[in-house]
Amino acid sequence: MSAPPLANQRAIIDRRALAAKIGEIEGDESTWREALLAILQEALKAGREEMSRRLVENPSAGHALCGGHSFLLDQLIRLIHDHAADRLAPAPEGKPARALSILAVGGYGREEMAPHSDVDIVFLCERTDDERTVALIEAILYLLWDLGLTVGHSVRNVDDIVKMAKADGTILTSLLEGRYLWGDEALYEESKRRFFLEVVEGTERQFVTEKLRERDERHKRMGDTRYVVEPNVKEGKGGLRDLQALYWIGKYIHRVGEAAELVDAGLFTRSEYKSFRRAEGFLLAVRCHLHDITGRAEDRLTFDLQKEVARRMRFADRRGKSAVERFMQFYFLQAKRVGSLTGVFLSQLEEQFAKKRARRGLLAGFNSRPRTLHGYTVFAGKLAAPGDEWFRKDPVRLIEIFRIAESEQLEIDPRTMRQADRDSGLINDEVREDPRANAAFLDLLAGRNDPETVLRWMNEAGVFGRFVPDFGRVNAQMQFNMYHHYTVDEHTIRAIGFLTKIEKGELAEEHPRATREIHRLKSRRAAYVAALLHDIAKGRGGDHSVLGAEIAEKLCPRFGLSDEETTLVAWLVRQHLLMSHTAFKRDIADPKTVEDFVAEVQTLERLRQLAILTSVDIRAVGPGTWNSWKGQLLGELYDRSHERLRLGHVTSGRKHRVDAQKAAVREALGDKAALMDQYDDLLPAPYWIAEPPDIAARNIVQYSVARELGEALSVHCEPDEERGATLVTVIAADHPGIFMRIAGAIHLVGGNIIDARIHTTRTGYAVDNFLVQDPLGQRFGEDNQLERIERSIADALERGAQLVPKLAQRPLPRRGAGAFDVRPSVAFDNDASHRFTVIEVSARDRPALLNRLARALFEHHAMIRSAHITHYGERAADTFYVTDLTGDKITDPSRLETIRAALVDAASDEMQAELEPA
């Protein structure tokens, strides 16, 4: 799109000097060609080194950097053409040479060449079957290939161009941005004239429709949001391709030669064009760094590249935000700007088309009447400000218009969005404290139609962050980890959207309790405000939950919430991780877990609100984060806590609970109920309290069959649809270290243990239940998969297979995990359980981690009774309930410190390096 004039072009490549040097070459054709290639290779190397130096000196100068690479290739191709035409494919003596023109197309045509972009060219020929023309094209291509360039080329005459552009949209777009490079310029001009006359004329609306359809399909492929945390700089939403699409449309409709002419065409204001160039320049610079770092055409801004690009582009750490998080926040702000510019551009284009239709159509002069709503104009389902001074006269209207759009289910006219963006700076403290503005905002936030979409519009227009400055601080802010898929603002808006869907009953199958309980809340407004504020303090340093609660205490009264609602929201923000941490990291079957959770929650209203907030928070993290296993754990915790809060006490004592469980197991056994008479006293009371009746029934049947067959080892795998995992039960003679060997064997075949319970019968047998998922978080279900798990466990327990070397060779669970610095940490809690010491280990997720942690505990005589495994992207949080060899808690401080050191060592990167084969 017309790169700016290059400084010191000859430092990149001096074509005249090179031409003179080539002119001095002597010898036959073979010798001459070899010498020519050597000169060109040296020039290409020197030019790239110069551009690498400029990349370091001016790391954000995207246009100049891409223009420099384009200039380098322009000069090389011109040299190659001239000297190939003279020495390698000369015109026949006495005959004029047929016209040949070389066109740069694609990114090269736009002068947007990153260091390793493809070189896309068109050879435009007077005649494609002319022998000398064919020989010249071949000579040029062989030299370009010998230089190591990736060349995309086509050979066309003018008739071909017209015919193929009509038939193929991709070719049409490529030719649209074609740039004359070298050769016969008159032939190029003729092709350009016929292209616009015979291909473009009269097809403008069709082209726009097709480009927008392609854009939408591309967005869908790339995740359909510009806020994915590993964006594609070129193809992603808000990326370079979106800007290019605007240029294509502008050129097709208005014949603009460069992006600046979009202003004269009335599609951008001058300030919007400057914003266009800033976003484009930044994205081009990022792409250049990606190519330079990887040494290839890489457009994905992956975790492992983000740190290095941030460093190169001179972003620095700040309090509460790392350099990479600041860089990515700036990236997403540019992507957001691209989205806003696209809306402005398309609205102006639609207005221009509408005027043409009105002038030319059969119904010219007829206008359907707009209606008035609260002073606004409504036409064709769009809500518009009635005049340019509308928001300036009363800035509260900047909030009001979004409330009306949500309540009346209307779109906001893009021109009015443009006004709102322009006038968002009018929102000051006076507007923020205005009761009308806050009432309108709260009505929008807790809207019953689609607050998610309208809040996203409000955010795009810059109004949201102005009205709630604390939200503005997390606008476009990413969290540098593999757990969160979106920026903080996008995550928050999605959480509000899921809350609306639950209230409408659209997620009843996945969230039955939340769907039921949301209609029993005393304050639905509190639920929506808590969803808005739960992550509001991220990136400030310190505990975002505590800091967020302080923000809630200030904002809630401003929004118009009562003192009671404010207290509730502040508590929800402070404790929004409590329920998930309790359900996923603690043993819910342990009575103390529920006791401690209920002691913090205290009321049924808090429980309902927290359960709903927890569900939408997890759902909004990203696709696949919510699963049936998490739903079941949260549901079980909710039900036990609800019973305790409703009745005010435990419904029955320990003996009664065991008897009730045994009765439920007897019922689950059906026609095999008599087995309970035989094995009623086989397992101790903690087993019957911990295991659900359906799993206990399966254990009893498996144990019975193993005894009948005289099997010393019984392994059974069964998909469990309700839990979203595969139940793996191992019954074997109990011995120290059995857990670590089973864990290693399961991981060796690609299984991830998400929960484990270890029991010992009164006859000395281990009955161990594991819930296992595949690497994608799904249950294993194929017969061959189940057989592999069973065989791997048998090999580990019966034949003593060596696990550690094999485990160390397995790849990291997710690509890019090595980009994160996750220091292992170990926490002990002797108050979380009446019977066990609870140990929580947080470390980088990696092969054999659970096996190594279990080995460390085994070697220090800590007996694992249950294990609960949670993954947060690149980080694993493994919780163990343990005792010493006598079945007591481990309380000696020096022994705990020894265990801590062993676990940290087992979880460290250094240990992984030692285990990996050379």
Image (cartoon, rainbow, N blue to C red):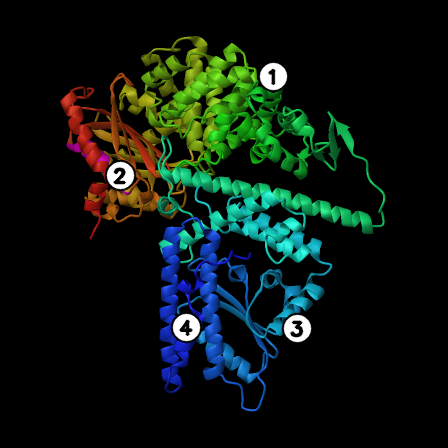
In this rendering, the label closer to the viewer, 2 or 1: 1
Name the residue type under label 4: Ala
CA gap, disc 2 to disc 4?
A: 62 Å
In the rendered image, residue 855 lying in the magenta stretch gets the answer yes
Q: Quadrant of residue 640?
A: top left
Characterize the local packing of mark 3: few (<14), some (14-19) or many (20 or more) Cα atoms within 10 angstroms. Answer: few
Which mark is on residue 849? 2
Q: Quadrant of residue 684?
A: top left
The magenta segment: 847-859
Q: Which residue is mark 1?
A: 435
Characterize the local packing of mark 2: few (<14), some (14-19) or many (20 or more) Cα atoms within 10 angstroms. Answer: many
Which mark is on residue 159? 3
The single residue placed furthest to the front in the displayed view is 8
Name the residue type under label 2: Leu
CA gap, disc 3 to disc 2?
A: 65 Å
Report the predominant secondary structure element of the magenta stretch: helix
In this rendering, the label closer to the viewer, 3 or 2: 3
Q: What residue do we see at 33% from left, 42% from top?
A: 751
Q: Which residue is mark 4?
A: 17
Characterize the local packing of mark 1: few (<14), some (14-19) or many (20 or more) Cα atoms within 10 angstroms. Answer: some
x, y (%) of residue 441? 59, 23
Query: Between 822 and 149, which is closer to the camera in this rendering?
Result: 149
CA gap, disc 2 to disc 1?
A: 55 Å
